[in-house]
């Protein structure tokens, strides 16, 4: 399995969220049944058993919980199914309250959250498969134990890559398959359970493909483009001051996107009409202007450092070029 590319600045997005679920299970607040590898909670899979499976399982909560799964990303594509209860769910800007038989799909680059902020009573199933991708433009690599025909797997990949609709209503067949997966996961019979799990996971993919075919999904090839990867990178920097404030080189930006430097510069300039360094300063200056307005107790130097400027003098020079006044004058004018 590839190492998680979402190790953002010393931590992974999903570490704390997994810990919350595991702690609840240890306290007896929720039943957790899962097989997993890596940091995901559950009984650990052997190295050569179902390669690519990050986590398969379910939780069953019979009472309101004091925890939720905060914003996170996974190393793989995640399929979830709500068997009973209701559950707040969000992907990027999409928000909904899941109802029984709702089914979700999230890709590795999609931030998502389960619970707002807590999880209610209900039974939720999930499957997380690592397909060797972290960014939209990268080719998908299905594990060798997947037995779908070449054409079926190609069509399933195209549908899942070229649309990002997060919420679907599952068919009765999908519901039944998730329940069979849950029975296999909860079984303590080692060999037989793994054999059944392999069969049921393949069946699930066939049934999901049938469901999506029937839905006549509209596809958008741009969702799997290099441009899309770079758009997501810059959106992440604009939305997260902690990320924006780091020391970025063009090489580091390109590596974060899984691209070569020349390729990254070309597509980034096409997207923003600026070089990566120019656009980085543009984003940092816009963030600084917001901080000057919203954080009157922060000094000019603190604002500069928070936004990634190593020198308050350099920050003031660039700020004056963009806004036509010093940071201090900008703050006074805004307060007037």
Image (cartoon, rainbow, N blue to C red):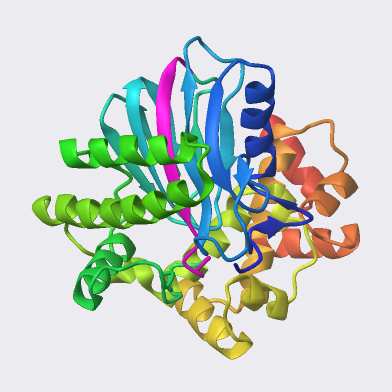
Across and down, in percent, residue 76 comes to 50, 57
Magenta stretch: give its range: 120-134
Question: Between 22 and 319, which is closer to the camera in this rendering?
Answer: 22
Q: Is residue 108 magenta?
A: no
Q: Is residue 126 magenta?
A: yes
Question: Between 6 and 314, which is closer to the camera in this rendering?
Answer: 6
Considering only vertical position in the picture, is 70 above or below 271?
Answer: above
Considering only vertical position in the picture, is 36 above or below 229?
Answer: above
> Dividing the picture into quarters, in which one does residue 283 lie?
bottom right
Whether residue 324 is visible, yes or no, is: no
Image quadrant holding the C terminus, namely top right
Across and down, in percent, residue 207 comes to 21, 51
At horizontal 51% and vertical 21% (from top left) the residue drawn is 119
Q: How many marks?
A: 0
At horizontal 24% and vertical 52% (from top left) the residue drawn is 208
At horizontal 76% and vertical 33% (from top left) the residue drawn is 295
In-image side of 133 versus 174 (left or right) = right
In-image side of 251 versus 34 (left or right) = right
Across and down, in percent, residue 220 comes to 25, 65
Considering only vertical position in the picture, is 141 above or below 162?
Answer: below
Across and down, in percent, residue 116 comes to 51, 23
Question: Between 88 and 198, which is closer to the camera in this rendering?
Answer: 198
Whether residue 198 is visible, yes or no, is: yes
Question: Between 64 and 307, which is closer to the camera in this rendering?
Answer: 64
Image quadrant holding the N terminus, namely bottom right
């Amino acid at each position: 399995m590839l190492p998680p590319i979402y190790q953002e600045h010393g931590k992974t997005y999903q570490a704390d969220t997994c810990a919350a679920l595991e702690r609840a299970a240890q306290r007896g607040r929720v039943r957790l049944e899962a097989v997993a590898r890596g940091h995901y909670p559950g009984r650990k899979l052997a190295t050569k058993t179902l390669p690519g499976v990050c986590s398969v399982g379910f939780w069953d909560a019979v009472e309101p919980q004091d925890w939720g799964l905060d914003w996170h990303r996974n190393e793989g594509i995640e399929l979830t199914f709500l068997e009973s209860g209701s559950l707040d769910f969000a992907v990027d800007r999409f928000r909904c309250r899941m109802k029984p038989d709702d089914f979700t799909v999230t890709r590795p680059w999609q931030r998502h959250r389960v619970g707002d902020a807590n999880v209610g009573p209900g039974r939720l199933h999930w499957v997380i498969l690592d397909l060797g991708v972290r960014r939209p433009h990268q080719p998908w690599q299905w594990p060798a134990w997947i037995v779908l025909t070449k054409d079926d797997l190609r069509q399933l990949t195209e549908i899942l890559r070229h649309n990002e609709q997060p919420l679907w209503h599952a068919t009765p067949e999908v519901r039944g398959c998730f329940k069979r997966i849950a029975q296999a996961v909860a079984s303590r019979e080692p060999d037989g359970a793994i054999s059944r799990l392999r069969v049921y996971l393949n069946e699930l993919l066939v049934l999901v493909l049938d469901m999506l075919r029937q839905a006549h999904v509209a596809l958008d090839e741009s969702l799997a483009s290099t441009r899309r990867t770079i758009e997501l990178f810059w959106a992440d920097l604009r939305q997260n001051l902690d990320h924006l404030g780091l020391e970025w080189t063009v090489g580091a930006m390109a590596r974060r996107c899984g691209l070569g430097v020349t390729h990254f510069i070309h597509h980034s300039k096409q997207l923003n009409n600026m070089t990566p360094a120019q656009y980085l300063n543009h984003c940092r200056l816009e963030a600084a202007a917001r901080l000057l307005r919203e954080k009157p107790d922060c000094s000019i130097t603190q604002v500069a450092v928070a936004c990634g400027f190593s020198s308050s003098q350099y920050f003031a020079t660039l700020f004056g070029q963009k806004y036509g006044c010093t940071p201090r004058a900008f703050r006074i004018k805004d307060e007037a």
